Image: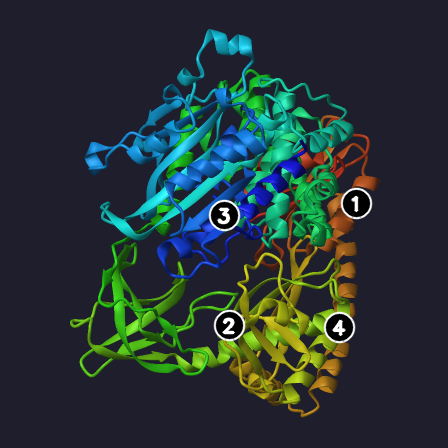
Amino acid sequence: MTSQEIRQKFLDYFKSKEHLIVPSAPIVLKDDPTLMFSNSGMTQFKDYFLGYKEPKAPRIADTQKCLRVSGKHNDLDDVGRDTYHHTMFEMLGNWSFGDYFKKDAIAFAWELLTEVYGIQKENLYVTIFEGDASENLERDQDAYDYWKAVISEDRIINGNKKDNFWEMGASGPCGPCSEIHVDLRSEEEKAKVSGLELVNNDHPQVVEIWNLVFMQYNRKADGSLENLPAKHIDTGMGFERLCMALQGKSSNYDTDVFTPLIAKVEELSGKKYTGILEDEKDIAIRVVVDHIRAVSFAIADGQLPSNGGAGYVIRRILRRGISYSYRFLDRKEPFLYKLVAVLQEQMGTFFPELEKQGTLVTEVIKSEEESFLRTIETGLIRVDKLIQQTISEGKKVLPTEEVFELYDTYGFPDDLTRIIAEEKGLTIDEAGFEVALNEQKQRSKADSAQKVYDWVVLEEQESNFVGYDQIEAETHITKYRKVENKDGEFYQVVLSNTPFYPEGGGQVGDKGVLENAAESFEVLETKKENGLIISLISGLPKDASALFYAKVNATDRKNSQANHSVTHLLHEALRDVLGTHVEQKGSYVGPDYLRFDFSHFNKMTEEELASIEEKVNAKIKESIALQEFRNIPIKEALDRGAMALFGEKYGDNVRMIQFGSSKELCGGTHVKNTSEIGHFKINSESSAAAGIRRIEAISGDKSEEYFKGLEKQITELSQLLKSKDVVRSIEKLIEENTSLKAEVEAFKKEKAKGEIGDWKNAYEQKGDKQLLVKKTSLDAGSVKDIVFQLKREIPTSVTIILSDADGKPMITVGVSDDLAANYQAGAIVKDLAKEIQGGGGGNPGFATAGGKNLDGLENAYQKALNI
């Protein structure tokens, strides 16, 4: 059975059991403050479990792209070193939202595994929750009773809270779970040791393939448990492990999920994969084929590698793959990007984002490879210098501070530093490095750490967002909770009616005030979490149940929505001018400016930028009225021509924003008419990543301020130049300046000619060689010309000139060609530059160095006389 057939059989089975089959949510989470990535199948259904949204159907099944590389669920360090851990993996799942519970979930799982997939019953074991006295939780007797109806009781194993009580996080829905394990060993091995002894003991061939979670509790922030209003089923089966079991393999990497990728790596690297766990070459191949999947899906879903947040995680995964291929596959040139086409062929049918975004994914990975390989080459030079310094000092351990700086500042892999050091008979301070790494992690945690208390519920009522239609509203607090962070103590509130737009879709969250006659609180930010619109306020009202008035900062909202609406016009203009390959890849919309990232492979020309500005401003001048379709079926919106962005999660019903021919799916706030935007001005166009360009621009009040500033500058220039024709006056100044520069250069040359004669007679005889050490105030260009002339005309000579031109120390060294083999100008200038706190370089015949310490020229002069 191929992996494609295995996936399809799962979905077909649950469709026959009246489950709605839904597509995978994006692997990257953009509007969830608690998670960067989907790390389990249930992530996209959190709101259903928490009761914030109604599920599309009471029964659902899917396969979900997952990524586990950070936080509680972090498998990164295990990847490549065993047969079954991965960064990106598929989680097959079936879900019940208040419909069926333990009995049916167990029956479905058993029937699918044993009858549809044909796994032999004697190779399966199951675990149940044994209970936990500290939580006052009893053994899961129901699960035990349902299991013993289909499997012998000696194959039902009690599991502790760590293994058999599943929790979404520190708080939230949770419950006991029942794992299904499969024994893939040979009959001979099974006869020696029972599978019972190997379950949950990290045996590579006795592995968990499915976890059935019985969601019945809610974990509160204080650690206590309460019953959920309804009981749910949440299951997750590892697709890669299931393929290993059904294809009779002993490693996930031997299944057809990975073998096409491995074959391509073999072809590109010339290395043969043998599947040996301890072989560094094989580990590297496993790392590469795993990591290319994770990175490709993340980029396809809209997350570009970067230096912060989710982008940093993706960059780290990719660099780990590049590092392994560099060290153990001898790949010094980019090659991971060539695997994307294989991945597309394997998975593009089921995950069309790989096909749609294939060119972008390929180009981004190639660019990142080129960049990191340059980093490695530069790092190798730094490591070599560090090793030479350590050896010269008679030490055996590389200094921890420098090793950590290589890793932290320059991105050079610490294990590569370790390998190179060991080749030279040196080591790194492993304990010291770990201390430095942990200190950095603690600093990072301290900056972001906050304590969130339980909600205090005043009224069970859904929050009503009224911000599309009004920026002020009469309201009351339905629930609140305290939040403590490094900045102090604050309160998060949920309002019955809220005009505050929550951060999302690139647009910043609203700020404002929450007030009544008795007191007033500043609204510092507004975000969305698990379907709730939450505003952060500066304190807790004396009477939290009182009536309040919520007021959005009107100026900020006006400018933010002007910037948001203009991004839609910008998107359309870019597609008109550059082509339909242009797609939005990220944005920031605030009151001060907008940032718009889009797919395009070339730097935009001045003509293209001017055309974009012209098209957008033409739309603004047309005074196009907003057409808002607030709640229409997504199919209808797409049929109308609305743009849907890859990597975004859309519901069955969506909001469509239309300004004339511009149509986009969008949840943000917008102007009622394009005339409210005022004027659009592009400030800059730059590269955001390989294949991604970035435009930063202004509109609204900021564009008005910009033109007022220009007008003021022109007025001031007119006054300075005593002319209203500013352009002509500046042209005249440039002409005069050019003429004066020519006169100055002629004067310098005359002065230099006079100096040459004096300097030729100032050489001192040093044995059979000649040395000139001279101080001057001549500029660098003049000194260079003189030194080149002297080193040609004076044989067996070393010329050292120390200049203080423009108050900056400069040392220039020239060595005649007949001495260049023994006296290196670069080495001399490097030594002398220490006195002026500077550095420089050149070639054996000529070198220069600048510095910071002008007073040090005297010491450099005395030092030079002793050469």
| Residue pointed to by mark 4 | 576
699 up-or-down from 801: above or below: below
Determine the secondary structure under disc 1: helix
Spot occupied by residue 101 in the image (x, y as percentages of width and height): 38, 44
Task: Find the distance from the CA under tag 1 to the CA under tag 4.
Answer: 56 Å
Question: Any mark on residue 668, and which?
Answer: 2
| Residue pointed to by mark 1 | 788
Instruction: Give me the residue at 75% from left, 69% from top.
Output: 741
Instruction: Give me the residue at 26% from left, 69% from top.
Output: 478
867 up-or-down from 347: above or below: above
Marks 4,2: beta carbons within 8 A: no
Q: Which kind of residue does numbered mark 3 sit on?
A: Ser
Q: Which kind of residue does numbered mark 4 sit on?
A: Asp
- Whichever of callouts 1 and 2 sits on the residue coming sooner in the sequence is 2
Disc 1 crowd, CA 10 A, few/some/many (<14, 14-19, 20+): some
| Residue pointed to by mark 3 | 38
Spot occupied by residue 197 in the image (x, y as percentages of width and height): 40, 16
- Whichever of callouts 3 and 4 sits on the residue coming sooner in the sequence is 3
Q: Which kind of residue does numbered mark 1 sit on?
A: Phe
Disc 2 crowd, CA 10 A, few/some/many (<14, 14-19, 20+): many
